[in-house]
Image: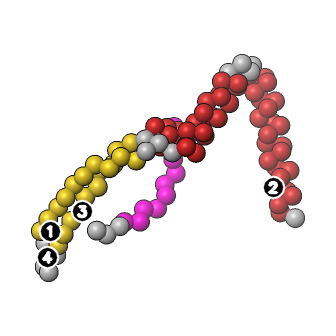
């Protein structure tokens, strides 16, 4: 069975949240195995469902993100703007330190 390499595409934060939640809850994936003859014709195809169990790191990340969102719901727009400015300033200063 050949594997295809896919280039990463940009994803919205909603897509990332959906993927993270899926990984945290566990999911099923369909696997197919094909056998070919000497003329590259498919002689046998077997399709099975495989269960991917929940990932502990994904569960932890989902829980951390939800608690952060719950904390931010109590902030006013002005408080959120001030927090954003503070975080951007910290990010800019850390980038400046890395450039040196």
> Which is nearer the eye, 64 or 17?
64
Q: In the rendered image, which residue does mark 2 sit on?
A: 95
- The span from disc 1 to disc 3 (Cα, nearest Å) is 10 Å
Name the secondary structure under disc 2: helix
Dominant secondary structure of the magenta stretch?
loop
| Disc 4 to disc 1, C-alpha distance | 7 Å
Q: In this figure, which residue is indicated by the disc labeled 1?
A: 42
Closest to the camera, between mark 2 and mark 4, is 4
- Residue position for label 3: 33
Pointer 2 or 4: first along the chain: 4
> Bounds of the magenta span?
4-16
- Residue 24 visible? The answer is yes
Of marks 1 and 3, the one in the foreground: 3
| Disc on res. 88 | none
Q: Could you tell me residue 77's position as x and y percent?
A: 74, 22
> Is 56 on the left or on the right of 87, as rendered?
left
**In which quadrant is the C terminus drawn?**
bottom right
Q: Which residue is mark 4?
A: 37
First of labels 2, 3 by sequence position: 3
Looking at the image, which is closer to me, 99 or 23? Answer: 23
Quick check: is 10 in the magenta stretch? Answer: yes
Note whether 100 is above or below 84 in the view shown.
Answer: below
């Amino acid at each position: 069975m050949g594997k295809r390499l896919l280039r990463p595409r940009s994803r919205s934060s909603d897509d990332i949240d959906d993927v993270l939640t899926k990984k945290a809850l566990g999911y099923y994936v369909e696997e197919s195995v094909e056998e070919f003859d000497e003329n590259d014709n498919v002689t046998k195809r077997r399709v099975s469902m495989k269960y991917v169990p929940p990932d502990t790191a994904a569960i932890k990340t989902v829980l951390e993100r939800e608690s952060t969102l719950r904390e931010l719901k109590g902030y006013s727009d002005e408080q959120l703007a001030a927090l954003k400015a503070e975080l951007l300033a910290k990010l800019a200063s850390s980038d400046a330190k890395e450039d040196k």
